[in-house]
Amino acid sequence: MYCLGIESTAHTFGCGVVSNKPSDGAICTVLSNESKMYKPVEGGIHPREAANHHANVAGDVVSAALERAGISAKDLDLVAFSQGPGLGPCLRTGATAARALALSLDIPIIGVNHCIAHLEIGRATTGCRDPVMLYTSGANTQVIAFAEGKYRVFGETLDVGIGNALDKFGRDLGIPFPAGPAIETMALKSKNYIPLPYCVKGMDVTFSGLMTAAFNLAEKNGIVFGTKPRQHENSLLNDLCYSLQETAFAALVEVTERAMAHTEKNEVLMAGGVARNRRLCEMAKIMAEARGAQCFVPPASLCTDNGAMIAWTGIVMHRSGVRMKLKDTQINQKFRTDDVEVKWRKNGNGGSI
Amino acid sequence: MSAPQSHFFKAVFFDLDGTLTDSKRTIFRCLNSTLDKFGYSTYTEEEIYPLIGTLQRRGMFYRKGGEIPDDKLQKMIEFYNELYLSTYRQDTSMFSGIMDVLKALKGAGILTGIITIKKGFIARRLAQEMGFDQYIDVVVGDGDAKLKPAPDPILTACKSLGVDPRFCAMVGDAPGDIVSGKVAGCKTIGVTWGANSGEKLADAGADWIAKGTDVLRDLLLPDDIVRRGAEAEIHKTVFMGRPAIQKKRVPKSYRIPQVDCAIREARTKEETKLLSAARAAGIDVPALLDVDLARGEITMEFVPGWRAKDLIEDESTTTARRKALCRGIGASAAKLHNAGIIHGDLTTSNIIVRPSGALCFIDFGLGEFSKEIEKQGVDLHVLMEAFESTHSRFPYCFGEVMKGYKAGFKNGKGVEEKIKEIVKRGRYMRSHE
């Protein structure tokens, strides 16, 4: 079965083609995974601008995905798309593209929960079976695991996502979007920890206070917006980036460990754009090993927002008997993971799809 | 769990005289008989007891006899050994409770050994004749290795058992036992029923002091880790000779030491404050015994009694008693909230009913100071869920809790409404909502 998946929850318009083998439907083959990313001229992501970007590139990205996969549109058996959660205008652009494809090709269409897609592509490609997922991206910061027939959120940010928090810190200081990789590089140059507020409440985290504290420290020391990149070769900024990462990531790993202890699971799966940060993955790995568990990190292209994960989850859902009529394909900006009936996994089941 | 758990022992070594066996009268009698027979002056009880376990027989003879020629000394030792072995049963016995400790260790699969300055063959024969050799895996005595306080006999015993000394404990009643154990790398436990006081053993560096065999047993058996959560471990321990509970916030290697220390210190401090504030407000919580912020450890009273959970479920508890207990829980929760304390994990497992009937709240690890109605509501909602899941057979219980609560808390009605509101939110399986 060939499935084309469209991802458009935020700044990425992605399209991937994935197949499963007729002999073993549970084996995932990613044939292509193309994407184009909207980059704001200044400031953060502007939903309408992002949606315009997606509309402009949709045709090219879909064609590129089909071409890279080496199949033509009429070979497709299924179209899947990100139904939410995400930015409304962006989601609508992707959904419209998906509906157009499904209608013109006369093939089924399935709306996929974006967070669940991160988890399913992780299970399909890393070998983990029943993980606790630490999902960290721009807008999303959640700890998700399977329990009682659904993917449930065990912990999450109470204010901003970790990616957005890092981006905002960078933006305030003139580090271009996305700031995460630049912060990671600068953090590597320091080993000097500056105490910053650490905020874990039960299984939840918050980052706004941490970011404000870091920004205030920067400002107090003359690092402000517009400071030339060269001047960013500043040891205090390196120290702040290092301290920011150490503090925020410690909180993320702590709530992940709590969820693992609570659910008695022994696998952790990293997902989302921030999971590309080596230090975060290293910390999760150390935590997992200390409790006799394993840590799994999908390849970078499948960690960030991508079409292949949507396509694969479409296949998984379709195989379990999920069917959608066009009227069921309305997008849902606040789509919760536990709104989805996980028919493809039995209760307490760790393995089968 | 990478780090060796502090007191889950692979093997436990015991000193013999004064630790396992009460043999001071035998030693006193045989020593004086020997000295007398060979024409030397004898010891008084006060003179001899502090020397037992520290000084070998040879030394004890020299002390009274001065320069004894070698052949004569040899004869004295032979006479002493013969007399000892043929008569020790008159006045040597095992300390009461020790046999149970040895049996329990065997039952738990923990190896045991005797480290003595007696001749090895004598110790082995004693163990056999007194019927505890079946619980002893190795005996190292005079002739088998260099003597205590050198670490050699313990290291020899470890080698023969194939265990790492760092995972072993040395138990003894003399400073020499403690020193030997420490140098070998073992954990050390001083016992006070032998020749020396707890202070003397603590001065020698004992990790723990046991004033009774029950305490020793608690220290040695692996069930001392009562609970291991994501953040902290609860250990049974001994504080100044009394059973106690130690809560350790364990270091996490994934975070840098600066972050790790700050978090553990802040949380330990917060929990300590909550415990003392509750106590100051007249609420029964475990008494704080010691706080070590740097290590993230709180040592507190071991609260004897039963978990409220078990009493409620117990078939023999009458309905009237169960209702009274639930009202008591409500009244105690009201006291907490009146004092501005949120427990944070209010379940019937975290309430201990003391033998006197008093209700004691334990585990304030998720607690905080707050007078917000939202937090009070969440606190009781957790308790309600605990009753609904654990005590569903007794559906009247939570109503009684609320009766007790409302009688003691001014805004009890408001909190009751809040609980209803929280129920309606219906978010599933979030940590403690």
Image (cartoon, coloured by chain):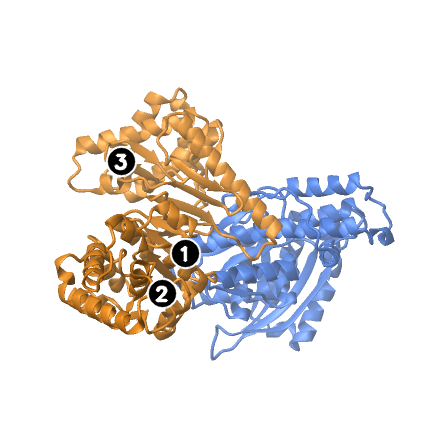
Chain colours: A blue, B orange
Please determine whether, in this image, residue B94 is positioned above or below residue B159. above
Please determine whether, in this image, residue A262 is positioned above or below residue B379. below
| Spatial separation of the CA atoms under disc 1 and disc 3 | 41 Å
Chain of the residue under label 2: B
Q: Is residue A132 left or right of residue B32?
A: right
1 and 3 marks on the same chain: no
Quarter of the rendering containing residue A216: top right
Q: Earlier in the sequence, mark 2 or mark 3?
A: 2
Eye-nearest disc, 1 or 3:
3
- Estimate how packed mark 2 is, as few (under 14), some (14 to 19) or many (20 or more) residues with alpha carbons within 10 Å: many
Residue B305 spot, x, y in % from top left: 26, 39
Eye-nearest disc, 2 or 3:
2
Chain of the residue under label 3: B
- The disc label shown at residue B354, or none: 3
| Residue topped by disc 1 | A149
Residue at horizontal 29 percent and vertical 44 percent from the top:
B390
| Amino acid beneath label 1 | Gly
Q: Does the rendering let one see residue B118?
A: yes
Eye-nearest disc, 1 or 2:
2
| Residue topped by disc 2 | B10
| Amino acid beneath label 3 | Arg
